[in-house]
Image (cartoon, rainbow, N blue to C red):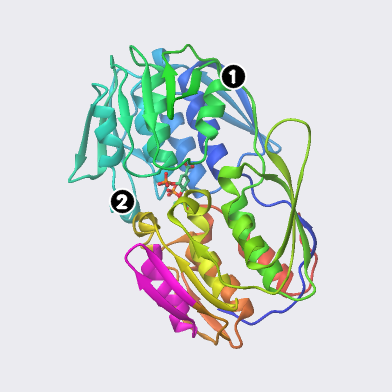
Amino acid sequence: MELTPCRNPLRGHLRPPSDKSVTHRAILFSALAPGACVIEHPLIAADTLSSRHVVESLGVTVRAEQDRWILQSPGPQGWSKPQDVLDCGNSGTTMRLAMGVLAAGSGRYQLSGDDSLSARPMERVARPLRSMGIAVETQDGHAPVTVQGGVHHGTTYVMPVASAQVKSAILLAAVTALGATRVQEPYPTRDYTERMLRAMGAQVQHQEGFITVEPSSLHLVDTMVPGDPSSAAFWAALAALTPGSDLTLREMSISPRRMGFYRLLQAMGAMVTTERKGAEGDVGDIRVSPGQLAGVTVLPEDIPDMIDEVPLLALVATQAQGETVISGAHELRVKESDRIAATVKNLRALGARIEEREDGMVIHGPTRLHGASVEAAGDHRMAMMLAVAAAVADGPVFLEGAQHVAISYPDFFTQYHQWTQGQPFAS
Ligand SMILES: O=C(O)C1=C[C@@H](OP(=O)(O)O)[C@@H](O)[C@H](O)C1
Ligand SMILES: C=C(OP(=O)(O)O)C(=O)O
């Protein structure tokens, strides 16, 4: 895809696509209890369709009606035996959370993924699940993965990496375990699983630095899915980088555990304000306009709250005065691509002054980016970051792999082209 520079101010408002993490959880958790539930505004994208496929294979039915899905679940006692291997596609969240969900069943379940997902580490989930007495097999630490559901017990697990997916898999298995489970994270990660399980009747508490779960009987609840801060971040970055912009991102999930990118954008000098909507829940609007940008230091404890936005922050840093140092981001090496290597390679091709570190990057700004050929490395977030880069560059950018946006944001390029053509956003 050829992308040309665009300096059109971003004005007005946009409701970003629905939150991918919340949609995955609402779908997968529906398998855990018998009954019906409604998901309002689910994200309909390749990754969340992978989660839908998994629960449908267990006998959950999903009926789409306008902007909602109505799910009917037999509960674990009534799960059907999947006809085939459960294909998780490109979605790490689907595979890792499903491993915890499947512990509630009584069958032997096989999970597979595409080439990218098959290269990602799965022992980080298998290990704690085994400590609960669940038989889990991986192939040299990778998919395909086999989970034998059935009787299992609680555990105490100190997580070596900060990962909401690993935490979620353990907490999900904990609900149907005999005895309590305690999990400790090195840094706090997104807590949708804890909050959603609690709403379903689970006993989830924070005690002495551990998240504890008691075996619980669950009931299904309806979920209203807010906008996704990680998808909205591409527009926030464009608004921060384009003079004359004043963009409001509406109905967003504004949980502090998802706001790391916005906090850093503000620390760099962009105008970022948040307005909470309603008395309860972490939903609100975020308004972004440009400012004089300066480099920042991103520390290991900052990473979990902006894990999927690190490549985008690196791009913003190319336009900021001074040095930006990002450290403690090893996890980026095991995402849909090696996001440290792919970010450095692509931004360097566009003229950025950027150095690769084992656990992050150092960016020296500001630099005028120029046109070049770049490659999304099979990674949706890389494709969207490079589209933002193309807009701020001085010459045409040839992007290979634009189609990967279908993983989390199928309408991204429709909206992007509307913006480049000077049309208002269709929000
Ligand atoms: O729990 C989740 O919904 C997610 C957790 C993060 O992964 P890790 O748990 O591997 O950090 C994030 O990168 C991913 O996009 C979604
Ligand atoms: C890492 C991501 O997702 P997942 O781990 O679910 O594949 C992402 O969406 O950036």
Can you tell which quarter of the image residue 220 is in? top right
User: Residue shown at 59%/21% (left/top)?
Assistant: 199
Point out the image quarter for the C terminus. Answer: bottom right
Vertical comparison of 29 with 159: above or below? above
Query: Identity of the amino acid at label 1?
Result: Ala
Mark 1 and mark 2 in contact (Cβ < 8 Å)?
A: no
Element at label 1: strand
The answer to whether residue 15 is left or right of residue 299 is: right
User: Residue shown at 41%/30% (left/top)?
Assistant: 57
User: Residue shown at 65%/43% (left/top)?
Assistant: 253
Element at label 2: loop
Q: Where does label 1 land, which residue?
A: 36
Question: Is the CB of mark 1 within 8 Å of ligand 1?
Answer: no
Is residue 156 at all visible to an observer of this figure?
yes
User: Residue shown at 34%/32% (left/top)?
Assistant: 99
Nearer to us in this view, 378 or 307: 307
Nearer to us in this view, 16 or 162: 162
Q: How far, Cα to Cα, is label 2 from label 1?
A: 33 Å
- The residues colored magenta run 339-363
Q: Residue furthest front?
A: 208
Vertical comparison of 212 with 319: above or below? above
Question: Is the CB of mark 2 within 8 Å of ligand 2?
Answer: yes
> Which x, y percent locates residue 287?
76, 57
- Classify 10 Å Cα crowding around label 2: few (below 14), some (14-19), many (20 and above): some
- Classify 10 Å Cα crowding around label 1: few (below 14), some (14-19), many (20 and above): some
Query: Identity of the amino acid at label 2?
Result: Arg
Vertical comparison of 128 with 3: above or below? above
Is residue 60 at all visible to an observer of this figure?
no
Q: Where does label 2 land, which residue?
A: 120
